[in-house]
Amino acid sequence: MSQTVIRIPINNVKGGGDYTGEIRVGSQGTIANVILDTGSSTLAVIPRVYQIADDKNVSYTPFAQLVTYGTGGWSGPVLQTTLSMGAGDNQASVKTYIAIADDQLPHNLGPADGILGLAFNALNSAYDLTAYLTSRKIDPPVTYPWLFPVKTSTAALQQVEQFLARSTEIDLTPYFTALEDADVTRNLFAFYTLRSTPSTASAAPETDPLNNGIFVLGGGLDQTDLYTGQPVTVAVLDDLYYNTNLIAVQVGDAAPVTVSPLPSSQAKTLVSNSIVDSGTNSLVLAADAYQAVISGLGSLGAEFATLVREATVNGAVPQSRLDLGNWPEISFVLQGADGSPVTLSCAPSTYWQTDAPRAGDAVFQIKSGGSFPLSILGLPLFNNYFTVFDRTQNPYGTISFAPIALGQTP
């Protein structure tokens, strides 16, 4: 097995709050800044960043993809070409599937050039249009150029979805899996991040060290300069997402509050009651977990409840009203890799993000998922830990969290 380890600088400004890293696409090595998302598996770029006609490595397919997110969605043709991460002599390159996100809803990917999903094959579904293309005498039977007029509207996307639903659905091998299959790099990756929203404290946010991090491809706990102390390891229960079992939440020194398991009616579609997701820049909690946090903070004093309520309603509060030294850690108890509970904690400086969205303001990064029974443990949790997704461990891998070493630079 190859021991290639590549550190890739990542930044949360270019993606509008999500962390992006550079990929190089095709024979030209066209650079695209893509969101690094453990909550999805699809690799896609928007058309303006990649000149397909100039790519000597491209091959066309009869496949199409359509992906919807909480913020919108896109559809487009699927190609195969070379894709690499890293620079110079230290690159991880493989020929892989890539979609061209033609039918984007407005602002769907923010200012990013695309998205790189880091989850498993089950989230990288595509539609095989061979039968349709052949019946229409399209020769060769490929989906590029794209078959549908480009319209940035929900209605247009729904029309494409209805059409594609009549075709055979298949799973495509994602880029990260293709790297491992080709023995290019080890089957693990890691994140070093300090923020879940861009800090606007600096006149140049893109160069602010707080807004920059590191994505480690093929490396994990061997990167000892990126963490301190002992890691804890969480079980991944399924390869639908990075599914985890949230057992309880705890506010400060109060007793942990047990949270509900996933309702049996949702077991087939969601698998477990929580996931770990680098593509979500808040902690989005199921109703009982969210209420436990809000009640726990409220029990500390009226001012805690007031600030949370105002930040939730208004989007932010003046950070001059926050004394983060008085706020407690908020902890999440999850099922560990060995079956015993492990505790992960968010510092006040991570679940409150200062100088966001404007200098002098602060946002509260714990949200209610409403009736959705799954808690999404996003970037505010990552910001406390060097977070390692180790897919070498059977059957579904593990996620290790080691206390982050501050002051590291990409």
Image (cartoon, rainbow, N blue to C red):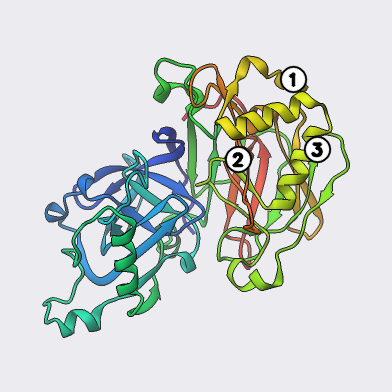
Position of residue 43 measured from the top left corner of the image (x, y, whole percent): 36, 56
Locate residue 259: give its quadrant.
Answer: bottom right
Q: Is residue 31 above or below residue 182?
A: above
Query: Which amino acid, by three-letter code, is at mark 1?
Result: Gly
Label 1: how many residues lie within 10 Å, few (<14), some (14-19) or many (20+)?
A: few
Q: Which residue is mark 2?
A: 382
Query: Which amino acid, by three-letter code, is at mark 3?
Result: Gly
Question: Measuring 68% from the left and 33% from the top, which residue is drawn there?
Answer: 228
First in sequence: mark 1 vs mark 2: 1
Look at discs 3 and 2 and give the one toward the viewer.
3
Question: Measuring 75% from the left and 62% from the top, which residue is drawn there?
Answer: 261
Residue nearest the viewer, comparing 370 with 276: 370
First in sequence: mark 3 vs mark 2: 3
CA–CA distance in space, label 3 to label 2? 22 Å
Label 2: how many residues lie within 10 Å, few (<14), some (14-19) or many (20+)?
A: many
Dot 2: element: helix
Q: Which residue is mark 1?
A: 325
Q: Is residue 410 above or below residue 104?
A: above
First in sequence: mark 1 vs mark 3: 3
Q: Which mark is residue 130?
A: none
Q: Which residue is mark 3?
A: 296
Residue nearest the viewer, comparing 183 with 237: 237
CA–CA distance in space, label 1 to label 3? 17 Å
Position of residue 260 measured from the top left corner of the image (x, y, whole percent): 77, 59
Q: Is residue 408 above or below residue 53?
A: above
